[in-house]
Amino acid sequence: MRPENQSSVSEFLLLGLPIQPGQKSLFFSLFLGMYLTTVLGNLLIILLIRLDSRLHTPMYFFLSYLALSDISLSSVTVPKMLVNMRTQRQSISYVGCISQVYFFISFAGLDNYLLAVMAYDRYVAICHPLHYTTIMRERLCTLLVAGSWMVSCGGALLHTLLLVRLSFCADITITHFFCDLIVLLKLSCSDISLNMLVIFTEGGFIYLLSLGTILGSYIRIGTIILRVPSTKRLVKAFSTCGSHLLVVSLYYGTFAGVYFFSSSWDSKDIIASVMYTIATPMLNPFIYSLRNRDIKQALEMCVDRLKFFK
């Protein structure tokens, strides 16, 4: 067993992004702009849904929580990364690092569950339109969101508790811009077989179940539409599901790039992580607003109200 254990580790060093010193100011401004866009864009989505009664439907109820989760996911990692870039300090406390792991897993998992719930909502809306209001009652919607929060927080707590029991060695350098669970496990001197078993069983089962729910919902939607094909039905289905499908593709595409198709943490994996943690949450408001007539109308109404008060 290598020397230094967990009790003597008070901090870790985050190497951050592989950026040349002369380009740090440029990238700091870029990531700050992306983060502010993420926060303001998703807050605008939440505000519009709360203010416009026409958006008080299950689909937008779930979308508002997805926007909140995206803000939180970016806020777990980006502010610390920006502070480190600005101050040239790379350290993060042990408690801060463990906390970052917990909240990152929580909100990444919540995104995953909410995307699955939204796919089920679209399935009910298209395949059972006459029973939609009966099935997607307010109580069920609340239970689905509450259940997503509980399962994501429970899973994050399990991984965090398994992490804090480990010992860490003299090498405390994290080759990433945030405390990622997989990278931390590689720094441990202890036996991590139980951690990896839980990651592959619990994590794999949850993500495969969510992805299976999404794929199953859209396969069923496609089957129903193609049974009696018509241009009008295809256009309506695409306008209803197009935004969600694009967000799902971004989320699972970047997630797979980071955790399944990388053999070691290099610059390509870090770029994929930037897409997963920064770019995707920033793009979601644009995807849902640019392709959504209801959101556009709500935004226009909000602007008209502001002009009236002026």
Image (cartoon, rainbow, N blue to C red):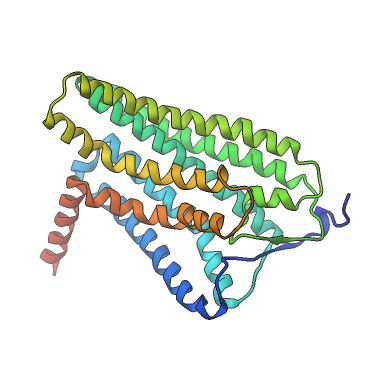
Picture residue at 38% right of the left edge, 59% below the top = 38
Which x, y percent locates residue 71?
43, 54
117 displayed left or right of 165: left
Which x, y percent locates residue 20?
56, 75
- In the picture shown, does residue 205 fall above or below 64? above
- In the picture shown, does residue 86 fall above or below 186? below
**92 or 238, which is in the foreground?**
238
Which x, y percent locates residue 49?
26, 47
2 displayed left or right of 137: right
Residue 37: name its quadrant.
bottom left
Which x, y percent locates residue 68?
40, 49
Q: Would residue 216 be visible to someone looking at this image?
A: yes
Q: Residue furthest bottom?
A: 22
Picture residue at 38% right of the left edge, 41% below the top = 248
Q: Quadrant of the C terminus?
A: bottom left
97 displayed left or right of 127: right
**27 or 103, which is in the foreground?**
27
Picture residue at 58% right of the left edge, 62% below the top = 177
- In the picture shown, does residue 67 fall above or below 195? below
Residue 171: name its quadrant.
bottom right
Picture residue at 65% right of the left edge, 41% below the top = 159
Residue 18: name its quadrant.
bottom right
Q: Would residue 128 be visible to someone looking at this image?
A: no
Circle count: 0
44 displayed left or right of 116: left
